[in-house]
Image (cartoon, grey):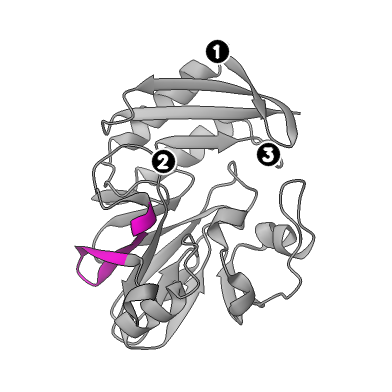
Amino acid sequence: MSEKNNNIFHTEIGDGVYQLSSKTDGLSLEPGKPNRNSYLIIGESTALLFDLALEEFYLCTYAHKFANKDMNIALSHAHIDHIYNIENVTKIMMHPDDAPLLMKGTIFQPPLKKLPEFTYLNDGDVIDLGNRKIDVIHIPGHTDGSILLFDRKTGFLFSGDTVTRRLLYGMHSFVPIEAFCYKLEDLKKLNITNIYSAHDRCALPFEHIDYMISLLKRFSKSEGRILDFPFFEKAEFFSDGNENEISYFDFTVVKR
């Protein structure tokens, strides 16, 4: 790959697991402003790229060359910032409830002109990469078809935009906060060592799940700051902590 097309860098975060990031967002791995990250998980027989979260058109080429074996691509969800250059992809793995975002579009993103072939992932499915099994967990809230992946080998939870330091909520079917928190509680049954979200390079600790749940319950009983929000009338914003520290969470609820 030429130096001109070398804006992607990778960080080994575990045995056969790599975080792929863009130099455009800087090189820091510390908590701070949001950035963009995809994840490459390599098994003995195949590899899996989780999210097309980098704008660089050669992301898939970079990941495939690095993995040096057959590679599938899965989406945590189908928002526009997770499907960059998807028109160049022939096959995609995703939850069926987010397929309409690609086929029909929504208020803030147009439908795809060229659709890939879909392989649907549902809650409880297991992706076998060869001596490496990945559990699929469906938690609607950020989108109807948001999924998380749990790598049994490392104990890593790849959480997309669901377990995160910044949660955007209510743009699609509205899931009651109590139901969302119940699904988060269920994650605590897993032997999670680290949590990696799409818009932070830092690993979140297992305790971040309880932190999120407690704040969501508190926020749901209070009033946040009202903001103008693109494509929607308003949004309500809540936050806790310092963005430059791990213990930070903000929550934006779109008002229809």
What residue would you read off at disc 3? Answer: 171
Mark 1 belongs to which amino acid? Answer: Lys
The boundaries of the magenta stretch are: 9-24
Q: Secondary structure at mark 2?
A: loop
Mark 1 vs mark 2, foreground winner is: 2
Q: Is residue 162 above or below residue 15?
A: above
Q: Earlier in the sequence, mark 3 or mark 1?
A: 3
Residue 192: in sight, yes or no? no
Q: How many marks?
A: 3
- Work out whether 66 lies above or below 175: below
Q: Nearer the viewer, mark 3 or mark 1?
A: 3
Q: For the point 71% across and 53% down, which residue is it?
A: 109
- Residue annotated with mark 1: 221
For residue 76, above or below residue 232: below
Front residue of 166/185: it is 166
Check the image and report above or below for 91 versus 195: below
Residue 186, position in %: x, y?
Answer: 43, 43
The CA distance from mark 3 to mark 1 is 20 Å
Residue under pointer 2: 164
Question: Distance from label 3 to label 2 (Cα)?
Answer: 17 Å
Which quarter of the figure is the C terminus placed in? top right
Judge from the rendering whether residue 193 lies leftward or rightward of residue 221; answer left or right. Answer: left
Work out whether mark 1 precedes mark 2 in sequence or the reverse, and give the earlier one.
2
Residue 50, image x, y percentages: 44, 65
Q: From this viewpoint, which residue is outermost toward the right?
A: 104
Q: Amino acid at mark 3?
A: Met
Q: Amino acid at mark 2?
A: Thr
Residue sitting at x 58%, y 11%: 223
* Residue 12 belongs to the span the image colors magenta: yes
User: Residue drawn at (45%, 28%), measured in percent from left and top?
Assistant: 250
